[in-house]
Image: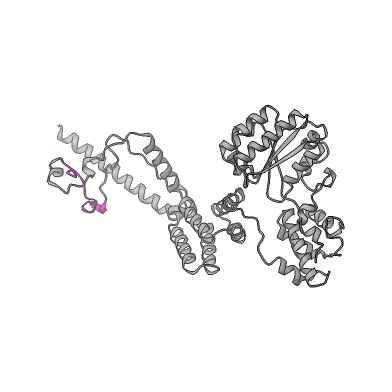
C-alpha cells in the first residue's frame, strides 16, 4: 500500500509547489515580463480575481503569492464559510496590520457569496487591511459585484494543456518525497494520453486519478500499469460539464449556434459533449424545442413536431434510446431551412404591447352571448370569414381601432415560408382591391 504518512494528504496537496519556478501553466500571467509576475517580483500586490476552470492552479497561485510576498494567508471557502468566518478573518487581519504584517485574504469559490457578503469585503480592501484574492469558476461579470470588480483586477486562468499535464505527471511519478517516486510507476505514451484525456485540463483530477491508479497497483502487488488497470480507474466519465455554470451555458450556446448555422456535424458534436458530461437529456430536449421555434419556425413546421417527439421518446424510453431520438431531431433541424421570422415578429408585437396603452377590443370582434351585449352592438359588424369569397374577409382590420395595423411577421424566402409569403401577398392584393372597390362605391353614392 501507499505510505500511510502520504495517505493523510492527497497527492495533489503534497505536490503543491512552493516556488514560482515549480508552478506549471499560466505562462501568459507569470511568464517573463508578464503583468502578474512583475507585480509579484516588485512586491506591488493588488487585489485580484482568478477566473478559470477547476484544477488549474488558482489556489496554488494565491498561496505562492502569499509566500513570496511574506504575507499571512487567510483562506475562506465561500461554500463552507459564513459571515462569522469573514468577521473573524478580518479581525485577524487587523491584528496583523497592527503588527506590520500584510494579510492576503483568499476567498475560494467567491461567486457563491451573495452580494451582501461580497460587499462586506469592500471597506477592508479600501483601507488596506487585506489584499483580496478571489477564485471563481464563473464569469465575474455576472457573479461578482461591480464594486468588488472595480477594486480587483481579473486574471484569466486557462485550462492546462497536455504539455503542462505531462510536466505535473512526470513530477508526480518521480518525486520520492511528496510524490509516487518510490513506487516505480511507469506509463507509456498511450496511457499518458488516456490520463490527459480523462483529466480534461484539470491537474487535481489528473493527480487524483494517478493516486487511485498507484493504490490499485499496490493492492495487486505490482508496479506495472496495464491497460486493464488504467481502464478500471478511468471507467467513470470525468468530462467537464458544470451544470448551471458557465461551461454549461457555453456548450448549450455552441449547440444552438451550430443548429442555427446548419452544421449537423458540429451540432452532433456539441450534443454529445453535453450528454457525455452529464447533462440531463430532457434539458437538451427542451432547448431543442426552443431552437425549432426560434430558428426554423414556419420555414419547416415539422421541426417542432420532431423536437417534441424526441422529448417524448426520451421521457418514455430513457437512455440510450431516447438520446438517439434527440440526436435525430438535432440533425433534422440543422439541415432544415431556417427562419426567425416568427421569433422576431413575436418580440416586436410583445414590445408594442408593453409600451402602448391598453386598447379596447373593437366591438365587432367581441362575442355577444347575452341580450345586453347584443344591444351594445357586440359583434354587430363582424364579417364571418367562411361566408366571404375564398373564406377571406378582404379589407377587414382586426387590430384595435386606435392602432395602425402593423406587419410584424415577415416571412423569409426559405422553405415553407416561401409559400406563406406568396399567400400573404395574395391576401394583401385582395385587401387593396376590396378597398379600391369600396372607395368607388362610396364616391358613386355621394354623386
In the image, taking residue 431 as reference, residue 234 lies left or right, namely right
Residue 341 coordinates in the image, percent (x, y): 44, 47
Residue 194 coordinates in the image, percent (x, y): 74, 63
Q: Main secondary structure of the magenta part?
A: loop
Q: Which residues are magenta?
A: 376-391
Q: Quadrant of residue 31?
A: top right
* Quadrant in the picture for the N terminus: bottom right
Q: How many marks?
A: 0
Q: Is residue 375 visible?
A: yes
Residue 243 coordinates in the image, percent (x, y): 58, 53
Q: State the residue in front, 388 or 124.
A: 124
Q: Is residue 130 visible?
A: no
Is residue 447 shown above or below 176? above
Seen at 83% across and 55% down, the residue is 178
Q: Quadrant of residue 319?
A: bottom right
In the image, taking residue 102 as reference, residue 350 lies left or right, namely left
Is residue 314 shown above or below 12? below
In the image, taking residue 233 as reference, residue 246 lies left or right, namely left
Seen at 32% across and 45% down, the residue is 429
Residue 387 part of the magenta segment: yes
* Quadrant in the picture for the C terminus: top left
Q: Quadrant of residue 300?
A: bottom left
Residue 107 coordinates in the image, percent (x, y): 67, 41
- Name the colouring of the figure: one colour
In the image, taking residue 123 as reference, residue 386 lies left or right, namely left
Seen at 19% across and 45% down, the residue is 379
Q: State the residue in front, 328 or 87.
A: 87
Residue 173 part of the magenta segment: no
Q: State the residue in front, 109 or 442.
A: 109
Amino acid at each position: 500500500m501507499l505510505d500511510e504518512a502520504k495517505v493523510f494528504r492527497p497527492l495533489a496537496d503534497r505536490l503543491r509547489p512552493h516556488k514560482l519556478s515549480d508552478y506549471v501553466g499560466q505562462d501568459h500571467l507569470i511568464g517573463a515580463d508578464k503583468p502578474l509576475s512583475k507585480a509579484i517580483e516588485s512586491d506591488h500586490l493588488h487585489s485580484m480575481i482568478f477566473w478559470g476552470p477547476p484544477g488549474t492552479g488558482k489556489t496554488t497561485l494565491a498561496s505562492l503569492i502569499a509566500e513570496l510576498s511574506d504575507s499571512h494567508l487567510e483562506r475562506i471557502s465561500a461554500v463552507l464559510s459564513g459571515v462569522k468566518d469573514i468577521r473573524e478573518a478580518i479581525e485577524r487581519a487587523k491584528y496583523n496590520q497592527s503588527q506590520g504584517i500584510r494579510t492576503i485574504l483568499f476567498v475560494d469559490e467567491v461567486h457563491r457569496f451573495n452580494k451582501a457578503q461580497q460587499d462586506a469585503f469592500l471597506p477592508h480592501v479600501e483601507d488596506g487591511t487585506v489584499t483580496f484574492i478571489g477564485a471563481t469558476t464563473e464569469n465575474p461579470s455576472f457573479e461578482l459585484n461591480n464594486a468588488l470588480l472595480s477594486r480587483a483586477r481579473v486574471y484569466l486562468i486557462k485550462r492546462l494543456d497536455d504539455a503542462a499535464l505531462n510536466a505535473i505527471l512526470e513530477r508526480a511519478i518521480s518525486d520520492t518525497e511528496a510524490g509516487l517516486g518510490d513506487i516505480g510507476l511507469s506509463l507509456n505514451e498511450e496511457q499518458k494520453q488516456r490520463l490527459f484525456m480523462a483529466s480534461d485540463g484539470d491537474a487535481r483530477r489528473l493527480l487524483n486519478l494517478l493516486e487511485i491508479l498507484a493504490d490499485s497497483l499496490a493492492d495487486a502487488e505490482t508496479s506495472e500499469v496495464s491497460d486493464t488497470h488504467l481502464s478500471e480507474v478511468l471507467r467513470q466519465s470525468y468530462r467537464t460539464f458544470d451544470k448551471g455554470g458557465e461551461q454549461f451555458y457555453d456548450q448549450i450556446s455552441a449547440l444552438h449556434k451550430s443548429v442555427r448555422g446548419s452544421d449537423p456535424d458540429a451540432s452532433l458534436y456539441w450534443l454529445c459533449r453535453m450528454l457525455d458530461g452529464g447533462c440531463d437529456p430532457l434539458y437538451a430536449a427542451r432547448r431543442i424545442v426552443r431552437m425549432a421555434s426560434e430558428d426554423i419556425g414556419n420555414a419547416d413546421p415539422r421541426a417542432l413536431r420532431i423536437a417534441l417527439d424526441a422529448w417524448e421518446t426520451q421521457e418514455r424510453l430513457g437512455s440510450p434510446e431516447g438520446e438517439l431520438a434527440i440526436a435525430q431531431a438535432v440533425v433534422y433541424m440543422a439541415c432544415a431551412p431556417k427562419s426567425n421570422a416568427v421569433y422576431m415578429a413575436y418580440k416586436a408585437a410583445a414590445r408594442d404591447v408593453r409600451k402602448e396603452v391598453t386598447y379596447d377590443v373593437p366591438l365587432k370582434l367581441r362575442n355577444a352571448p347575452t341580450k345586453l351585449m347584443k344591444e351594445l352592438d357586440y359583434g354587430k359588424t363582424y364579417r364571418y370569414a367562411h361566408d366571404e369569397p375564398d373564406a377571406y374577409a378582404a379589407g377587414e382590420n382586426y387590430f384595435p381601432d386606435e392602432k395602425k395595423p402593423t406587419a410584424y411577421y415577415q416571412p423569409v424566402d426559405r422553405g415553407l415560408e416561401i409559400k406563406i409569403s406568396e399567400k400573404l401577398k395574395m391576401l394583401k392584393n385582395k385587401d387593396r382591391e376590396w378597398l379600391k372597390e369600396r372607395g368607388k362605391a362610396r364616391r358613386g353614392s355621394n354623386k
